[in-house]
Amino acid sequence: MTRVTSILNQQKFSKEDLLFLLKTEGDNLKHLFEKAAEIKKENVGNKVYFRGLIEYSNICSKDCFYCGVRRSNKNIQRYQLNDNEVIQAAQFAFDQRFASLVIQSGERSNKAFTEQMEKLIIEIKKIGNSALGITLSCGEQSIETYKRWFDAGAHRYLLRIETSNENLYYKIHPKDKTHNFQKRIQSLHDLKEVGYQVGTGIMIGLPFQTMEDLADDLLFFKNLDIDMAGMGPYIEHKQTPLYQFRNTLHPLKERFKLSLKMIALLRLIMPDINIAATTAMQTIDAEGREKALMVGANVIMPNLTPLKYREDYLLYEDKPCIDEEAEACKNCLEARIHRTGNSIAYNEWGDSLHFKKRSSTLN
Ligand code: SAH
Ligand code: SF4
């Protein structure tokens, strides 16, 4: 038996195993991808869940060094969807049988924002009598806010740790009160305590990031016992401080391959969680999301943000589908997904199986 075969057949994976697999190429890599596809099929089936993505606002109080909508970027127009636009997008998701939404936003924690979000969640839940599942991705908030939004009807939350290496965290964020690594970890615990299905993730191919960091990130997810993950390649943005390090980065194709490996490895070590095939994958490779589905991902987030705002929600450059209507996006996605051997689970919330098992043992 080769070393790869014997590692792939293990139930537990050490950091060395993960590092070894992160570095595999050629036939061995093919073997890893096949194993991940098999584990996905056995544990969560070849189904894809859609989450209609609403990019609610690009107004942000933070200044992350990698992100195009950071507070200090004066070159973009700031927006916030009005209530009607949000409800229309939600209604569209319901009509298309998507069953779930993700509401993503720049981070704000003032009263006006948190109350507005609460109101919107309540309004969305009225559609089809609680037909839509709601995932939020609105950054770090107080536990009270998380609880209010949960009580209003949101039940999943995505908060990427971005990197689990504290030193690296402070190289990609300002070192100040609003960008605190320990606080971000605390937020993940708070979300769990409130009762959310909790998702986190990282960017892959960041400046200064090593293979060891990536292996540690996988173990961090496992230790935190997450229910969902969203990971994708880091893509440089001209109007951000990290752009100065662009010459030190892996080529985009490498970052893409590394992202596929990370998805496959995460499926291997956490077989029953939900893993998103992220938009950033599609930015690098037109079939990036489909490739992600074939090595372990099982969630896709079609963009439902009204077209006029899309060019102002550029977290990174060359984001795809900024000029495609939501409907066109859906039709092209459907055909693409069928080609991967997956079927779309319409009208199903597609909650994390891992969460279901985790909560049944808690009760
Ligand atoms: N403000 C919220 C949610 C919106 S940002 C938050 O930060 O949690 C959503 C994600 O976009 C971030 O978590 C980050 O991982 C990703 N992102 C931002 N800039 C990026 C870039 N340049 N390349 C790839 N992903 C990026
Ligand atoms: Fe704001 Fe999120 Fe971008 Fe950071 S990553 S600047 S919190 S939108």
Image (spheres, grey):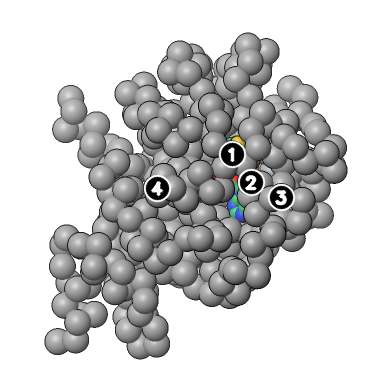
Q: Quadrant of residue 78?
A: top right
Residue that carries the numbered disc 3 in the rendered image: 240
Q: Amino acid at mark 2?
A: Phe
Q: What residue sits 38% from the left and 29% below the top? A: 186
Residue that carries the numbered disc 2 in the rendered image: 65
Question: Is the residue under label 2 in contact with that under label 1 (CB below 8 Å)?
Answer: yes
Q: Dot 2: few (<14), some (14–19), or many (≥20) neighbours within 10 Å?
A: some
Residue that carries the numbered disc 1 in the rendered image: 174
Asked if disc 4 is less than 8 Å from ligand 1, the answer is: no
Element under disc 3: loop
Which badge, 3 or 2, comes first in the chain's sequence?
A: 2
Which badge, 2 or 4, comes first in the chain's sequence?
A: 2
* Nearer to us: label 3 or label 1: 1
The N terminus, quarter of image? bottom left
Q: Position of residue 55 (x, y in %)?
A: 68, 38
Question: CA gap, disc 1 to disc 4?
Answer: 16 Å
Q: What residue sits 66% from the left and 65% below the top? A: 246
